[in-house]
Image: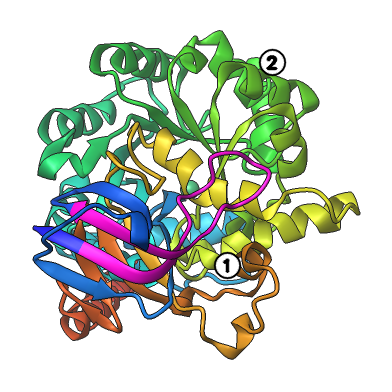
Amino acid sequence: MRTRITNIIMTPGVTNEAHIPFVYDAEILIEDSLIIYAGKRDEAPVFEADQTIDGNGALAMPGLCNMHTHTPMTLLRSIGSDLPLDRWLNEAIWPVEKHLTDDAVRAGTDLGIMEMLRYGTTSFNDMYMRMDMEAEAVRDSGMRALLGHGVVDFDESCSDLLPNIALIEKWNHAADDRIRVALAPHSEGATTQKVMEKIRDAAETYKVPVHVHVSETRLDYEGGIERRGLTPPQYLDKLGLLEYPVLAAHCVWFTDEDIELFARKGAVILHNPVSNLKLASGVAPIAKMLKAGCKVTIGTDGVASNNNLNLWEEIKLMPMLQKGVTLDPTVVSPAQTIAAATSVGAKALGYDNLGLLKPGYLADIILMDLSGAHMAPCNDLESNLVYSAQGSDVVMTMVHGKVLYRNGEFTTLDAKLVTERASKEAALLLERAEKAKNA
Ligand SMILES: [Zn+2]
């Protein structure tokens, strides 16, 4: 399939962190899954297209990477809202998650993928359970994802590592390489040293990244020091895990030494500002981390702590929070923010040709309508993009060269059916949990 996207403004994405470059009167040419040209329309090569997409003056940009989520938690939207974290987990989330079924996970994943596509997310990094269901949903929807089975281990049996290894063997590089698999130990506090050492060995054997929650809360940080005599990042380093690609979710409670360690080792920070605020975990020192040279990406976390998968909320909040906390409006530029939402995340997913719009790169592209009242006048497009744009401005989402969402329509998902099925599965899930509670 040969596709021409024309009549657009385009950004190739952020290639340096000073500014977001824009190309006016641009055109993008795509052959199957790859971009073959992205630039000025009048300089484009001769190209016979099978389909032409008229952008109507929209902005074409790399699709967003939601770098930390638990997609099936869409079913738990608004469950346990406004509870303190320990009560939220112990009383609201875990008692319900115990009653998940394959059908529930599939329905929740379909709903989450639909929501992400609608708001311009083209790939996501996920840790959950019953991951075969998630993988099938990613395969069938045309989405791109890095998936890991969330490994917990309290008794050194290491048995929960087995489904993660099975997932790697079955799904890594599946569906035209749209699916990749990570090792996903839940956190320092929910795993033994024994299983962490096995995970390090598996990272070596399988050459896959390690996705883990790190110092999300004060309790994680203080508990880590109490249990291991080290901060969670120091503990990962001591185990040798930081010699492998580590994708570390949250990183809220970080010392200056932790920041320096992550910068030196190249560990990737997955920043979830909305979730960290809703659960009152705190604010990660992102401005400091960027200054130290850390790789920073953004994610929504699960819907139950967000309450949605619209990454544009994180795009606005990331710089805003840092300005507010540091009392310095110059920290965290629009370019650093868009890089965190696109190119830095894409690299962290393990692809070396994703996250920019240039020849040879995978065609994960979104179109942002610029005609809304909230976007006018366009005195400064990069500032508008980060501070004024809304997720609802996304009018097209393309993954791997295929249009999956355009002008309110999904091409691989039946929106009505997906929403109905998810609502039904959520009701059944809550019913099972309620029955068990009263039994
Ligand atoms: Zn999480």
Mark 2 / mark 1, whichever is N-terminal: 2
Q: Is residue 403 left or right of residue 246?
A: left
In this view of the protein, can residue 197 be seen by the observer? yes
In the drawing, what numbered circle is on residue 313?
Answer: 1
In percent of width and height, residue 32 lies at: 13, 51
Is disc 1 surrounded by few (<14), some (14 to 19) or many (20+) residues within 10 Å?
Answer: some
- For this orientation, the residue located farthest to the right is 327
Q: Is residue 214 above or below residue 29?
A: above
- The residue sitting at 50% across, 58% down in the picture is 300
The residue segment tinted magenta is: 4-30
In percent of width and height, residue 387 lies at: 67, 69
The residues tagged by marks 2 and 1 sit, at their Cα atoms, a distance apart of: 37 Å
Asked if residue 251 is among those painted magenta in the image, a careful observer would answer: no
In percent of width and height, residue 258 lies at: 70, 24
On the rendered image, what quadrant is the N terminus found in? Answer: bottom left
Residue type at numbered disc 2: Gly
Q: Quadrant of residue 227?
A: top right
Residue type at numbered disc 1: Glu
- The residue sitting at 67% across, 28% down in the picture is 293
Q: What element does badge 1 sit on?
A: helix
Is disc 2 surrounded by few (<14), some (14 to 19) or many (20+) residues within 10 Å?
Answer: few
| Residue at image mark 2 | 229
In the depicted view, which residue is nearer to us: 12 or 272? 12
Does the CB distance between marks 2 and 1 fall below 8 Å?
A: no
Q: Is residue 39 left or right of residue 381?
A: left
Asked if residue 28 is among those painted magenta in the image, a careful observer would answer: yes
In the depicted view, which residue is nearer to us: 210 or 388? 388
Q: Is residue 224 left or right of residue 347?
A: right
